Image (spheres, helix red, strand yellow):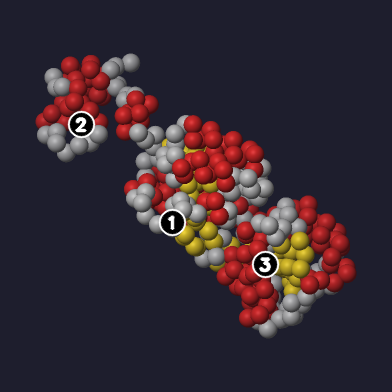
Amino acid sequence: MATIKEVANKAGVSVGTVSNVLANLPTVNSTLRKRVEKAIAQLQYRPNQVARSLKKQTTNTLGLVISDIANPFFPAIVRGAEDEAAASGYMLSIFNTDDQGGKEARALDLLDGRRVDGVLLVPSLEGGTTEAVLRMLAGGTPVVTIDREIEDRAIQGYALDAVVVDNRLGMAIGVEHLAAGGARRVAYLGGPKHMYIARERLAGFERGLREQKLKKEGSLLWTGDFRPETGYSVFLEKYPQTKPDALFCGNMLMCMGVLRAIEEMRLKIPQTLQIVTFDSFPILDAFRPRVSAVAQPTYEIGRAAVRTMVERLKDRAAPSRRIVLDPDWKPGETTFA
């Protein structure tokens, strides 16, 4: 493999001139630049990226830590982040935590040891990440949280950026469409209240009820864990007891479990029960009935997270940024409106 010194000798220039060409500095005149570029091509020279990173104190690598790659919500986020990172000159190093706090902390420590330029993080549902995040921030590695936020007060005082979706708006939109379709008793299947997104979506659901002048019934507030199994089991337990005329599922995974239960019970949708879910996955458009949904801009979430990180790397002293994206209504066949 050719060295930078061999390139300089072949081009008849100094090693410094070759370095300036590689860095694309405007101080090299066009004649010398062409000679260096020709020598690089002839020798098939490839710069030592590790050495260049050490010299520049950057790696042009971002860590992306997500909670569950098996969740169809995340692949589009990863793709958006990859595309934006590539356009900005960065590569991604991706870790999956299975929503386990300990696994997430180990991933963050590993990324810290690799001296990535920044970390994009979907905080785990278990929590336990604050200490690892604090170590990164204290060491000068910026962090941007995605979809969920870290609410621990220990994090205050550091610039911690976030990219989230307006969960409350999305829930209010969903309730509005259910009400427009004639629903008067609307049940909600949400997640554990210790979770940020679960609390946000419950607050948005209650806001929607108030705006549509619908009664809030405690018996219609059901709790799952954002996974299909609880969607299935909770619906089988709660629906026969309460018989709402509409159900808002807190995410698509629980909705998939609900649809399985509905099939077993042979309920007519939407005639017997209207259904709306938060989240929408393209693959589900192939199934019937097509579920009416509040769709999150998943691809744009990934892109916005990387853009926010790039801005942070350019201005580390800037105040914390909180980027809030709006969800969209995606009509389907499980509602009347």
Q: In this figure, what is the number of numbered marks?
A: 3
Name which residue lies at 81% across and 62% down: 235
Q: Which residue type does callout 1 highlight?
A: Ser
Q: Earlier in the sequence, mark 1 or mark 2?
A: 2
Q: Which residue is denoted by mark 3 in the rendering?
A: 202
Name which residue lies at 67% across and 67% down: 202
User: Foreground residue, 241 or 104?
Assistant: 104
Q: Which residue type does callout 2 highlight?
A: Asn
User: Foreground residue, 287 or 335?
Assistant: 335
Q: CA distance from mark 2 to mark 3?
A: 56 Å
Q: Which residue is denoted by mark 1 in the rendering?
A: 320
Residue 125 is situated, as x and y percent measured from the top left of the image, at: 65, 50
Name which residue lies at 46% across and 53% down: 157
Residue 291 is situated, as x and y percent measured from the top left of the image, at: 68, 64
Structural crowding at the residue carrying mark 1, measured as other residues with C-alpha within 10 Å and reported as few (<14), some (14–19) or many (≥20): some
Q: Nearer the viewer, mark 1 or mark 2?
A: 1
Q: Earlier in the sequence, mark 2 or mark 3?
A: 2
Q: Secondary structure at mark 1?
A: loop
**Label of residue 233 in the image:** none
Q: Secondary structure at mark 2?
A: helix
Quarter holding residue 20: top left
Q: Secondary structure at mark 3?
A: helix
Image position of 119 (left or right of 33): right
Image position of 171 (left or right of 314): right
Q: Which residue is denoted by mark 2 in the rendering?
A: 20
Q: Specify whether residue 126 is in view.
A: yes
Q: Specify whether residue 287 is in view.
A: no
Q: Quadrant of the N terminus?
A: top left
Q: Earlier in the sequence, mark 1 or mark 3?
A: 3
Q: CA distance from mark 1 to mark 3?
A: 26 Å
Residue 45 is situated, as x and y percent measured from the top left of the image, at: 29, 22
Extreme-right residue of the structure: 241
